[in-house]
Amino acid sequence: METKIATRQITAQDYAAWKPLWDGYNAFYGRHGDTSLADEITRATWARFLDPNEPMVAIVAEIDGEIVGITHCIFHRSTSRMALVCYLQDLFTQPSLRGRGVGRALIEAVKDTARAAGIGRVYWLTHETNAAGRLLYDKVAANAGFIQYACDV
């Protein structure tokens, strides 16, 4: 039997279900315990999702009304395109549901959201060790071969 996965933009009432997934996403990338994000960052991020003047969108995936995955994206200008582009910044699903289509549904929802906003490009990064995620990403997009560098200033 196929599981029906629904996606939609986040609402203010979703915080209690979103927060554990957000915490799981951050823990996956090493932000937990002493390296956890400050609560003020989480609160500001949540507020941005709900602010129609922010170029950020949060989408949830649901199975039987339960939120089982989240994704966040940001619309921004690019030096190589006239139109805005969409950066899919975060994507996380309940670990017990990985490989069941939740991540794919969230990526498709981001693509649909971008298309509806007149945006023709969605891109994202992942850590090289994210083998499970990369199995999906290699099926739905092309790896452009870029290596990310970052520094705090």
Image (cartoon, rainbow, N blue to C red):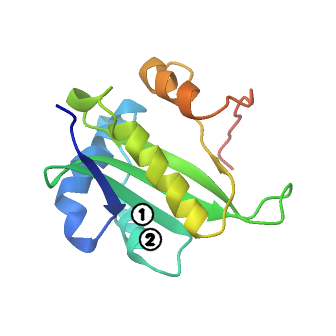
- Specify the quadrant of the image occupied by residue 132: top left
Nearest the camera: 109 or 31? 109
Density class for disc 2 (Cα within 10 Å; few <14, some 14-19, many ≥20) is: some
Q: Are marks 2 and 1 in contact (CB under 8 Å)?
A: yes
Residue receiving disc 2: 48
Q: Is residue 40 above or below residue 97?
A: below
Q: Is residue 108 above or below residue 93?
A: below
Q: Is residue 1 left or right of residue 69?
A: left
Q: Is residue 96 left or right of residue 10?
A: left
Q: Which mark is residue 126?
A: none
Query: Which residue is pictured at 20% across the width and 70% down the height?
Result: 13
* Amino acid marked by disc 1: Thr
* Amino acid marked by disc 2: Arg
Q: What is the distance, in whole Å, between disc 2 and disc 1 at their CAs?
A: 5 Å
Residue 148: x and y, percent? Answer: 69, 34
Residue receiving disc 1: 45
Taking the image as drawn, is residue 63 in sight? Answer: yes
Query: Which residue is pictured at 53% across the width and 48% down the height?
Result: 89
Q: Is residue 148 above or below residue 71?
A: above
Query: Which residue is pictured at 66% across the width and 63% down the height?
Result: 119
Residue 18: x and y, percent? Answer: 25, 55
- Specify the quadrant of the image occupied by residue 10: bottom left
Q: Is residue 122 above or below residue 99?
A: below
Q: Is residue 48 left or right of residue 14?
A: right
Query: Which residue is pictured at 41% across the width and 68% down the height?
Result: 49
Q: Secondary structure at mark 2?
A: helix
Q: Is residue 130 left or right of residue 9?
A: right
Residue at far bottom of view: 53
Q: Secondary structure at mark 1?
A: helix
Taking the image as drawn, is residue 26 in sight? Answer: no
Nearest the camera: 91 or 113? 113
